[in-house]
Image (cartoon, rainbow, N blue to C red):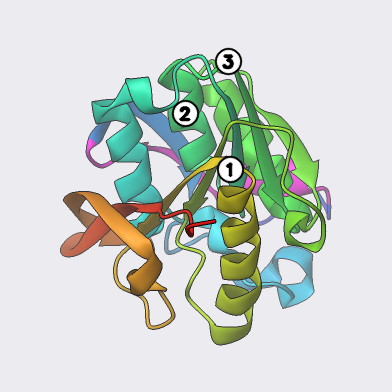
Amino acid sequence: MTECCGGSDPLDEIRCRLRVAPVPGLPGLLLYCAHPGSGLGQIAGGGASPYWAYPWAGGLALARYLADHPSAVAGSRVVDLGSGSGLVAIAAAKAGARAVLAADVDRHAVAAIGLNAALNGVAVATCRADLTDGPPPDADIVLAGDVFYAAEVAAKTGAYLAHCAAAGLAVFVGDPGRAYLPIERLSRCAEYDVSDFGDGRSTTRAAVYRLDRLPA
């Protein structure tokens, strides 16, 4: 197992424990990713789940959609909600978004986003906060990759995304069909075969959706 060389500083821990690896299906895009010797359970005393150390299926699908359809975000102000590794935010920046804000509540995620953005030569602003506690952001587009994995998170995030759509923001969701996905409110844009949780040995089907705005 890798011996951590940086104490409790998130930047040092990520550089020490994770490896830079290419992202499947996204040529030229790199991320710091976990590997069998990472010892992720020792980071932050084994607290919050290190979801930022792997590409999730929904995020991979959404990132690939932006690579295939850069006009979806080009020239726009974009917020990546629950950004994790920053994969979707980086894909938006590479697609030509005018400004990208990646938001997450985990300090290791925020550190990972900065490191991963630098790896890919793009500018991504970060915000360590739960945006779902506030109003829709000052932006044009909200991106949400894999945010419907648990009931409580899904309920809160789904309500927030609905407020964003009602305020006139475009909302795109990437998801592999998690149990709490509000499919009745979504319009399918594209589908991709992707891996999940960094498992490159198998694939799952994940889709990209646009959240429909309810009639006035």
Residue at the image point whose x is 64% and y is 57% from the top: 163
Q: Is residue 180 magenta?
A: no
Amino acid at pointer 2: Ala
Give neighbour class at mark 3: few <14, some 14-19, many 20+ (Cα, 10 Å).
some
Give 207 or 210, whichever is nearer the viewer: 210
Instruction: Give the residue pinned by disc 1.
Output: 80
- Mark 1–mark 2 CB contact (< 8 Å): yes
- Contact flag, marks 3 and 1 (Cβ < 8 Å): no
Task: Check the image and report above or below for 96 versus 150.
Answer: above
Q: Which residue is mark 2?
A: 92
- Residue 143 drawn at (x, y percent): 51, 45
Q: Which residues are magenta?
A: 9-25
Task: Say what secondary structure mark 1 lies in.
Answer: strand
Please give the residue where the numbered disc 3 appears in the rendered image.
98
Q: Residue at x 35, y 61 (%)?
A: 186
Instruction: Check disc 2: other Cα within 10 Å, few if <14, some if 14-19, many if 20+.
Output: many
Q: Which is nearer the eye, 50 or 122? A: 122
Residue 172 in picture, x, y percent from top left: 43, 47
The residue furthest front is: 216
- Marks 3 and 2 in Cβ contact (< 8 Å): no
Hey, which quadrant is residue 122 in on the image?
A: top right
The mark lying in front, picked from 3 and 2, is: 3
Residue type beneath disc 1: Asp
Of pointers 3 and 2, the one earlier in the residue sequence: 2
Across and down, in percent, residue 196 comes to 32, 63
